[in-house]
Each structure stands twice: as structure tokens, then as C-alpha cells.
Amino acid sequence: MRGERKGSLCGAYGQCPVCPLGLIDVRSPYALARLLQLKALHQTSREDLGEQAWGLRWHESYERLVKFWLPQFTDEAVLVEAERLLIPPLPPLD
């Protein structure tokens, strides 16, 4: 990702769906629950930043999330379990 430094933790919070190193376990209810939280954060960020600013920063990640990553979760048991999980919220997107 642009601006990342080798040997440092990733600073591209929220950009996992477009990261060439990003991957997801489609059998994990926890992973799905976190992705749904990320989707909700994108929607909140869009309202807070406005369409143009949000689009410049987050559009590509959001599109990849909703059109590629989320549709891969097809196991009904995973979907049901993800809805039942109680997990802490993610920090807001900046």
C-alpha cells in the first residue's frame, strides 16, 4: 500500500479489501462479523465526510468489500453464527 514501510505494522486501516496481501477466511463467522462492521463504518464515514471526500479515500475499498469479499460468504451456518457474535466495535475510519 502507498506509504507503507517495510518492517512496520500496516497503517492502511480499513483498506484490507484492496490490499494485495489482504485475504479472508470465508468459513469464519468472526471474519464475516468484522467485515459487516467495516461495511457499516464505511457507510458512517460516507455520511460524515460527504460523498466526494469519502469517494477519494474509501470508494475502492468499499466496492471491493461489497462486490467481492462479502459475496464469498455463502455458507448459511457462517452467516447465522456471524449474526450471533458479540464483538467489540472497530475504531472509526478516518
Image (tube, helix red, strand yellow):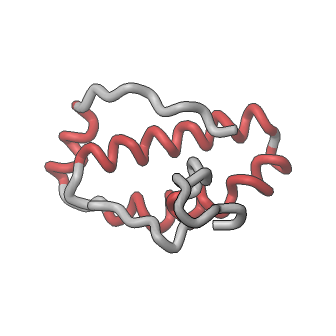
> Which percent across, then down, holds residue 65?
50, 59
69 lies left or right of 2: left
Residue furthest bottom as drawn = 20
| Residue 86 in which image quadrant | top left
Picture layout, residue 90 above or below residue 63: above
Picture layout, residue 84 above or below residue 55: above
Q: Residue at x 26, y 40 (%)?
A: 82
Q: Residue at x 76, y 47 (%)?
A: 54
> Which percent across, then down, holds residue 51?
80, 46
**Of 2 and 33, the residue lying toward us:** 2
Q: Residue at x 32, y 49 (%)?
A: 31
Q: Where is the N terminus found, in terms of image quarters?
A: bottom right
**Of 69 and 24, the residue lying toward us:** 24
**Of 12 and 88, the residue lying toward us:** 12
Residue furthest front as drawn = 7
Q: Where is the C terminus found, in terms of image quarters?
A: top right
Residue furthest right as drawn = 52
| Residue 43 in which image quadrant | top right
82 lies left or right of 54: left
84 lies left or right of 13: left
